[in-house]
Image (tube, grey):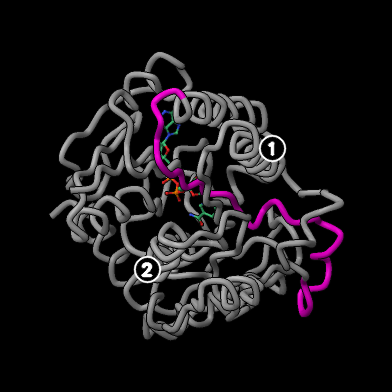
Amino acid sequence: MKKAIVFGAGGFIGNHLVKRLKAEGNYVVGVDLKHPQFSKSLANEFITADLRIAANVDNALQGGADELYQLAADMGGAGYIFTGDNDANVMHNSALINLHTAEMAVKHQVKKIFYSSSACIYPAFNQTDPTNPLCSEESAYPAQPDSEYGWEKLFSERLFLSFQRNYGLDVRIARFHNIFGPESEWQGGKEKAPAAICRKVAQADNSGEIEIWGSGTQTRSFLYIDECLDGVRKLMDSRFSEPVNIGSEEMISINNLAKMVIALSGKKLNIKNIEGPVGVMGRNSDNRLIAAELQWKPTAPLLEGMKKTYVWVNAQLTAQVPQ
Ligand code: NAD
């Protein structure tokens, strides 16, 4: 039986990944500051630990692992990473986790490590046109991410690649593009656009309005969690060790995403565009490299995943209403 360790196992993607790895027959150890919020972890062992502390990373990796998935990070949606208020914590906390992880993975002879980077590493100057953003892997340089979150991700990509070059660490790196689905943060400030829009629509009166940050013409693509995990597992099983996009190419404006959710709800709602943190004006996954190297592409339309996400967010709200 293979042993897989998941850092960030209490988070959205980490908790889903633990389920997937268990279903594939692995012995899974989860590590996080906290247990998952919305369902019990299926990990064989769950260690509650702060991975900013080297001794905790050292301890978690005792005995090594066949696979280590490093997903732990201080992160959130636009309301968390684009306001500037959390920059120091985002950089400091995530960099510490990654520095210790790289060092201890070598010390404990972890056989293969996955690192979750982000589309936020791509240069701001290539993402000013909402209809035609450039996010091919080689366009990452010359670098100019639009957030400190993106800079830290780029630094850590380079960190893991350096450990690969100098210490033989076997590395896989994915640049995730907006992963969404049930059991993600949906309130409280760290939620991302799909869950936030589902919440706003579910909370709105039948013929009211919802607020959307910015002009709403900014574009993004969104990848459903199950498809993201298909990509991650495929990458991990491959020999491809350069950073690669894992995302969808179904680009949509944020106002149109809101319209999609409004239609799903059956309500008659207006959209009010207000001032707010928006990030770059356009972003879309470029899947040419992953298609060529791994013969992988996502298949489910955005609408399908949004339906499941809306149903789940709506159920959370209903559960909160006192009877
Ligand atoms: P998440 O916030 O739900 O999960 C991250 C987890 O890391 C949390 O459970 C958190 O408690 C844990 N963590 C933070 N600091 C820690 C510490 N000091 N010690 C131990 N655990 C700590 O986020 P997610 O959406 O599941 O994202 C997982 C990874 O994928 C992150 O690295 C994120 O940057 C990356 N990513 C996600 C997306 C996305 O759309 N969700 C996009 C790009 C990249």
Percent of width and height locating residue 226:
35, 68
Asked whether residue 241 is in view, the answer is: yes
The count of marks equals 2
Percent of width and height locating residue 125:
86, 59
Frontmost of labels 1 and 2 is 1
Q: Magenta stretch?
A: 107-133
In this rendering, the answer to whether 57 lies above or below 72 is: above
Mark 1 to mark 2 CA distance (whole Å): 39 Å
The residue that appears at 30% across and 49% down in the rendered structure is 15
Q: Report whether 151 appears left or right of 53.
A: right
Mark 1–mark 2 CB contact (< 8 Å)? no
Q: Report whether 219 appears left or right of 116.
A: right
Tell me, for residue 202, which label it has, or none.
2
In this rendering, the answer to whether 178 lies above or below 305 is: above
Q: Secondary structure at mark 2?
A: helix
The residue that appears at 35% across and 29% down in the rendered structure is 33
Question: Is 63 included in the stretch rendered in magenta?
Answer: no
Of label 1 and label 2, which has the lower sequence position?
Answer: 1
- Kindly identify which residue carries mark 1: 155
Question: Which amino acid does the dot numbered 1 rest on?
Answer: Phe
Q: Residue furthest top?
A: 55
Q: Quadrant of the C terminus?
A: bottom left
Asked whether residue 204 is in view, the answer is: no
Front-most of residues 113 and 196: 113
Q: Secondary structure at mark 1?
A: helix
Front-most of residues 262 and 224: 224
Question: Which amino acid does the dot numbered 2 rest on?
Answer: Ala
